[in-house]
């Protein structure tokens, strides 16, 4: 299907864009996708390493999540790309080879960490907070050392992921902040050991609640948590306006002297599903006024988010899920629709290329509705792995 990749875009450059502005992409799913048979292409339709395509399109930073042990007792992956340390190293080396910096995103869980779930890793489940602090420090030290020693150009480490409601099974904010301190201490010690400039980011979401974010930042300050960057998820279909995002960021920048980054954002290029599994971005009701479900709509809203971020003094943006395409394109009206869907389901389970596998329900009760990618209509590649013109937004905003 060429209807998406043939759509053109017109993107205006951003005036006075910070020359060091981060144009990042979370690419955590790439290896699981490739194991499932996905082929990524360049703009001319030739097979090409996706990291080369990302670099050529203006992406200068790659974000990679790390889960502690995303496998059941039989070694079956939980899905969501089975984002373990080995995977992060392999992808990080490829990103580094094409001149991109790497942000390591530690969830300190065995599966997704977000406002709905902050489960402790299986081996930490019965730990006291004090024992968990020691375990978190050691896991960070051991994992980050392996990544750096593998030649990955790590320049940022995210300690925790969307941790508004807790981290690693702990909900008390004072306990969480002690965990954060140990993660930060591990990064600082390794940065000193390897003589690397590695920035520490903390990551929160739900920024529509500006007062709630302000309280979080003040508590971090009171507890003397040492960090460089406040990361926030900002999905325009769910998280309010650019103006609110700017106001939240300015409070942190001006009153606490911290850098701010949009750690996650995205938008759809279609409301269709590409793999036969439901999408997170569902139908026209999620559309933001002024931005339609098209390649140009996707490019334009990301361009405008980058402009708003730059104007407010943020240091950059990471796009989330931009590489998460269908294992195989599903068309419900095709004669082979049932066959394609069955094959997709088999590969989601075998290679972890869907958002969750069946076995994860024993660990994470929120993941009973396992299946494929919920994000393929927000990727920056079409349903067959060809880059969309919207991916070039990161290049065009600088021209």
Image (cartoon, grey):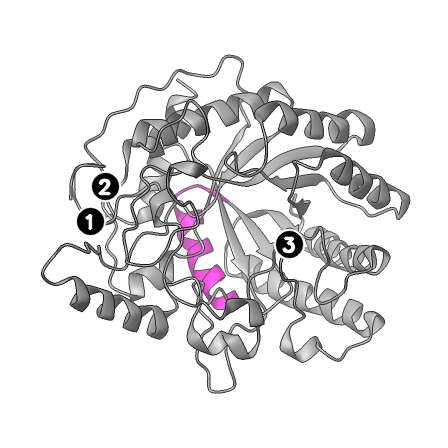
> Which SS type dominates the magenta stretch?
helix
- Residue drawn at x 76%, y 27% as measured from the top left: 251
Q: Secondary structure at mark 1?
A: loop
Quick one: which residue is furthest to the right in this view? 222
| Residue 78 disc label | none
Q: Which residues are magenta?
A: 85-101
- Residue drawn at x 42%, y 33% as measured from the top left: 287
**Pointer 1 residue:** 47
**Pointer 2 residue:** 42
Residue closer to the observer: 398 or 332: 332
Q: Is residue 206 something one can see in this rendering?
A: yes
Q: Secondary structure at mark 3?
A: loop
Residue closer to the observer: 29 or 85: 29
> Which quadrant: the N terminus?
top left
Q: How many marks?
A: 3
Task: Residue 83 in the image: state x and y as whole percent.
Answer: 48, 64
């Amino acid at each position: 299907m060429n209807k998406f990749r043939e759509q053109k875009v017109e993107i205006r450059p951003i005036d006075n864009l910070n020359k060091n502005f981060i144009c990042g992409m979370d690419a955590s799913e790439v290896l699981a996708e490739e194991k499932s048979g996905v082929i990524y292409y360049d703009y001319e339709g030739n097979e090409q390493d996706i990291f080369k395509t990302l670099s050529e399109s203006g992406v200068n930073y790659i974000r990679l999540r790390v889960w502690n042990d995303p496998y059941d007792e039989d070694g079956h992956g939980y899905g969501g790309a089975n984002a373990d340390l080995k995977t992060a190293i392999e992808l990080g080396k490829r990103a580094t080879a094409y001149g991109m910096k790497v942000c390591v995103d530690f969830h300190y869980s065995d599966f997704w960490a977000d406002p709905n779930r902050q489960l402790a890793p299986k081996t930490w489940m019965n730990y006291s907070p004090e024992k968990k602090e020691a375990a978190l420090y050691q896991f960070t030290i051991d994992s980050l050392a392996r990544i750096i020693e593998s030649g990955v150009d790590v320049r940022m480490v995210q300690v925790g992921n969307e941790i508004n409601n807790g981290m690693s099974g702990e909900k008390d904010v004072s306990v969480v902040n002690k965990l954060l301190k140990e993660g930060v201490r591990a990064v600082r010690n390794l940065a000193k050991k390897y003589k690397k400039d590695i920035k520490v980011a903390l990551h929160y979401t739900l920024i529509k609640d500006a007062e709630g974010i302000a309280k979080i930042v003040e508590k971090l300050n009171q507890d003397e948590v040492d960090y460089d960057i406040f990361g926030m998820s900002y999905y325009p279909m769910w998280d309010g306006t650019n103006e609110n995002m700017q106001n939240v960021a300015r409070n942190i920048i001006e009153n606490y002297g911290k850098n701010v980054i949009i750690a996650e954002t995205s938008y759809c290029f279609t409301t269709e599903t590409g793999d036969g599994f439901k999408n997170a971005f569902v139908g026209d009701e999620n559309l933001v006024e002024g931005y339609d479900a098209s390649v140009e709509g996707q490019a334009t809203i990301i361009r405008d988010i980058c402009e708003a971020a730059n104007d407010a003094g943020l240091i950059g943006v990471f796009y989330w899920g931009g590489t998460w395409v269908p294992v195989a394109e599903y068309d419900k009206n095709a004669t082979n629709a049932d066959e394609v869907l069955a094959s997709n389901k088999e590969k989601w389970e075998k290679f972890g290329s869907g958002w969750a596998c069946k076995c994860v329900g024993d660990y994470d009760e929120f993941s009973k509705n396992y299946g494929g990618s919920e994000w393929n209509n927000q990727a920056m590649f079409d349903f067959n792995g060809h880059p969309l013109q919207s991916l070039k937004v990161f290049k065009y905003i600088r021209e």
